[in-house]
Structure formats: C-alpha cells, structure tokens
Image (cartoon, rainbow, N blue to C red):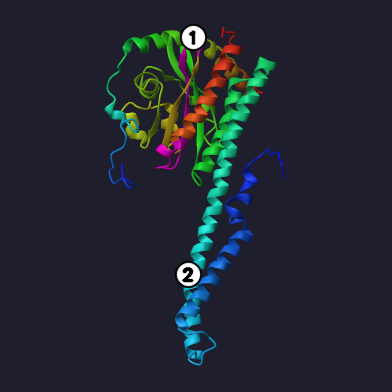
Amino acid sequence: MGLFSFSKAKPESFITNIDDIDHIDDIDHVQQNRAVSLEFAKAATKIIEKEQSRSSRRGRK
Amino acid sequence: MPARIFYDGRESWDETVKGLVRWRGIVAGTFSSIIIPTLLIFFSTTGSPWWTDSLTWETAKDAMLNGAIISLAIGSICFFGLLYLRKRTIRSLNVKYLSHQISHKVRDWHIRLNKNPDDVSLSGALNDTCNTLQDLFKELIPQKDIQVITRIISEKDGELYYTTVSRTEGLSPSRAKTSEPISANSGLASYLRDRSGGKGAIICYDIDKSIQLNILTNTQNHKNYPQEIKNLMAVGLNAWDGTDENMLGILFITSKNINVFGPKHIDCLGGAADIIAGLVSSIIIKKGNMSE
C-alpha cells in the first residue's frame, strides 16, 4: 500500500452488513452453548427477581 | 526532580505541547504569529531598509496595512488552531481519566463483593458502572444524548432471555413498569450470541428498519417511547459462566439523536463491556452460590 490509499474497500473483517448474515455456521456449538449457560441463567434470574421485588417494595413505601 | 506521584492525569494538559494549550501559551503563540509576519512583510514590501532615502511615508503606510491584514489573518488561524488543540487535549485526557474510572469502579465492586456479597446488588453495581460509562461516551460524543442500558441473561421455562437490569437516568423511569425480556434465540441477542460467535458490536442506525429486519425486538417500551432511542450500539457481555465463556448480557449505548455512533466508538464500547462482563460473572457466581 502506498502513502495514500484512494480505495474505498475496507478489510473484510471491518464491517459486515447485518442483512448479509443469514446462516449459522456451527449449530452444535450454539446448542451446546445454550445448555451450558442454563445454570448460570437460573442463578441470574433469582438474583434479578429478588432485586426487582426489593426495589418495587421500596417504591411502594 | 527524581520522582513525582500522580493521582489524576486530567490536569496534565497544562504541561503538554510546551504549554501552548494554556491560555498564556495561546496568547503568546498568537502574538508571536502576528509580530513575526508583520516584521517580515514590512521589510520585504518596503523593498529597502527604513534608513534609506527611498522609503516614503506612503510606502511604509501601505506595507504596514498589508502586514496588519495578513498577520491578523495568520494570528486568527493560530489562535483558533491552538484553541482547538486545547479542547482536544483536555477532552482526550478526560476520556483516559473516565476509562480509568470504569476499571477503578469495577475493581472496587469486586472488593466489596469478596468482603460481603450481601452488600452488593447486581443492579447497583451495573448502575454505578454504567453511569461512568455514560460520562465517558458523553465526553467522546459531546452535545449528544447518551444513555446506557444493560440486559442480563435470565431463564424462564427452560428458555433463555435477556432482562433489563440497569438503565441510566436520562431514560423514562416508567420504562421499568413495561420492560420485557428479549429472547436469546432471536433478533439482536441471537445475532450477537450465535451468529457472530459473541464477537463484534452491532450499530443500529435506523431503529424501525432494524425492527423490520428482526435485528431488534419491537418491545412495548419502543412503542411507548419511540423518541427516546433513535440510534444504538450493542455489544455482548462475554465472560465466564462457571463452565465456559458465554454471553452473560448485552450492553447498549443509545441516543435520541440520529447518526451518533460509528466504528470509531467500537473499541471503547468493547473494552468497557469486557471489564463489566467480568464483574457480572463474579456477582452472579458469588451471590448465586455457584461453583467457580
């Protein structure tokens, strides 16, 4: 590449238009990911619900 | 001076660029850029030294007038150039300071969590950190409305969702009453989580079109407050979930203005997201009594 670049082309990894993405490459990996995070999500849900009910109780007071 | 101790770098603009961004530096720089051209123009346009007989009052007056106009023009350019340099220098230092404050706050929340987990709430920690992130983006993108929202992973009937846990104060407080979780299996969460492997950030330049394309979910809050979010950036909060790396949440930076965000903001957003994700992971693992 010279001192000045007049090309408008960007490196491939720079931007992907969202409507270009129309497939999932590795469906097994996706499903495995979801299974793994379920326990964590349950723990998070308990914490979020507890905090939300505490703040709504505080709001009513 | 062999050593100095610093607690805050924001005032260091006073020492940068040889002091030119200080007010006296700006005045001195402008003054010298008027005087030097005036002298050069005076001597070059009069054509002969002032002590020779050929110099008349008329030629000297013309030379001085020309010199004054040109040097004032050069002086004004220098003045506004230095003023701009000062503004950019101070802004750059403030951005660095606020980036430091984000990691500082996250570190403090980690300490509080390890000392006494009951003293820490997920929403409290996220609100506090996101307020600083909001300040950082306000500094990066001045004169624009900037808000920060976090959604954290949750579960209902075996399905995964992302639920809003914190939002900064510029958004309507009534949003909390009508807030609804977004599915992890569709729209933006799915794009970030599954299709880009948790990497990258999404910028939505047109909210309505993004909803049409199913990139964003048409939530009740979007219907109730369409003017509040016109532009947004979203990035996954990826960290340890007790078993593997996972997308534990989504961090949104939103604005009611249009054409606010661009690729130059992505690294700042991604950096903050990685730090915040670690905190989210620690809080949920610790408070949820999960094994690390």
Q: Position of residue B151 (x, y in %)?
A: 49, 23
Q: CA distance from mark 2 to mark 1?
A: 66 Å
Residue closer to the observer: B53 or B275: B53
Mark count: 2
- Residue type (three-letter) at the residue carrying disc 1: Thr
Per the rendering, the mark at residue B139 is none
Q: Which numbered disc flags the more N-terminal residue, 2 or 1?
A: 2
- Residue type (three-letter) at the residue carrying disc 2: Ala
Q: Position of residue A20 (x, y in %)?
A: 27, 28
| Visible residue check, residue B63 | yes
Instruction: Give the residue at mark 1.
Output: B243
Q: What residue lies at 48% left-to-right and 75% top-to-bottom?
A: B69
Task: Please tell me whether residue B255 belongs to the stretch shown in magenta.
Answer: yes
Q: Relative to B91, does residue A32 appear above or below in the rendering?
A: above
Q: Position of residue B292 (x, y in %)?
A: 56, 9
Q: Report the quarter where the N terminus of chain A lies.
A: top left
**Which quadrant of the figure has residue B247?**
top left
| Residues at discs 2 and 1 both on one chain | yes
Q: Report the quarter where the C terminus of chain A lies.
A: top right
Q: Which secondary structure, mark 1?
A: loop
Boundaries of the magenta span: B241-265
Q: Relative to A6, does residue B193 appear above or below in the rendering?
A: above
| Crowding at mark 2 (Cα within 10 Å: few <14, some 14-19, many 20+) | some
Q: Residue furthest bottom?
A: B53
Per the rendering, the mark at residue B73 is 2
Q: What residue lies at 62% left-to-right and 20% top-to-bottom?
A: B121
